Image (cartoon, helix red, strand yellow):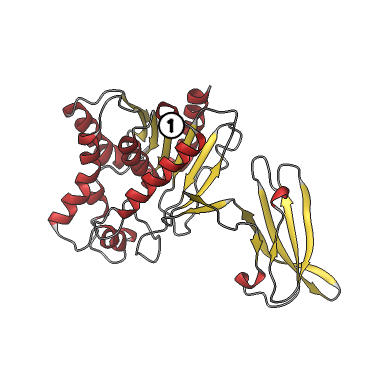
Amino acid sequence: MLTPKNYRLINPSEQNINEDVRLIVYDNDTSSFIVKEIIKSGEALELDEKLFHGNWDYKYKFQILREDKWVDHGRYTRILPEQISEDGIKYLLYPNQESEKLVVIFQAINTKQSYNYIKTLKEFNVNKLFIKDDYGLDELTKSSYYLGVKKDLSIAKYTQKLISDVVSHLNIKKENLIFAGSSKGGYAALYHGYTFGAGNIIPGGPQIMLGDYLYQTNPASIRFEIFQSIVGDFTEENKEWANDQLYDVLKNSTEPYPNTKIHIGLKEPHYKEHVAFFEDWVKNLNIQNVEIAGEDYTTHEELAEFYPIFLNNEVKRLVK
């Protein structure tokens, strides 16, 4: 069941503003202001849904009256049509009645939990589902890797349920599903793509050996609390449990296998430490339709430069 979240309610008190303000809403598509309205102190304003349409490229800011002039208070904040499933999974859904395809995008690790590649895919006339990950117990990134906490795999279950509900709602065939994401999002695209039986998976720089990657016993590492949140104590048994999660999904997958094309920098550590293991797994399990799209770069950070280009080209090819 898809449950709406009120993305149209604008509340100045959420930005610690306790005086009269003027709300400014700007439409990037038309380069025009669509709202200039006063909100009284202590009140909120619900915007008319009819204001929003098309590619959803809107942003808002507040202005405060100073010496008879409206002065900007902070920067623009983007308005997104965020919804929440009955299980608590946050998402953006951009339906397109003219398309038979659905692109599902998972987010990377971020200290500000946000949706990735909205702008990259903005111009594509295709159904789009962006899924947020802020369900972990670690305070900084809240990463669950779309799996769960303390080995419960609850988030994996709820994510699959959300995808199933959206696919049913839009009447999308599995072969017309495209799962995407980079780094953590790449892992999730593979995990959930093979679990659900998507037609296509196009991840970038995924962590395959999740236990090896997150097993960092140095508290200063960003991965320290993520491992504890998802898995638990730092033991070899727990590390292997994390390593096995994607392998078990592959082992239990059935034909027709997804058409999988993995983007990776051939000289960056994620190739030898992660993607090479995936190549061995699919070979040993006799899983077909897997391709490695290697690029000539050396660091994982360069993924931010190269993957959006790959993603754009692949989605263009797949929805053509």
What residue is shown at x 46% (from left), y 37% (from top)? 168
Q: Is residue 240 left or right of residue 214?
A: left
Identify the residue under disc 1.
Answer: 177
Q: Position of residue 90 (x, y in %)?
A: 47, 53
Q: What element carries label 1?
A: strand
* Above or below for 122 versus 291: below
Q: How crowded is mark 1: few (under 14 residues within 10 Å), some or many (20 or more)?
A: many
Instruction: Check the image and name the residue furthest to the right.
Output: 68
Q: Where is residue 304 in the image (x, y as percent from the top left)?
A: 46, 43
Q: Where is residue 278 in the image (x, y as percent from the top left)?
A: 24, 35
What residue is shown at x 39% (from left), y 37% (from top)? 204
In which quadrant of the rendered view does residue 152 lie?
bottom left
* Above or below for 93 versus 76: above
In which quadrant of the rendered view does residue 185 lie?
top left
Q: Position of residue 42 (x, y in %)?
A: 69, 76
Q: What residue type is labelled 1?
A: Leu
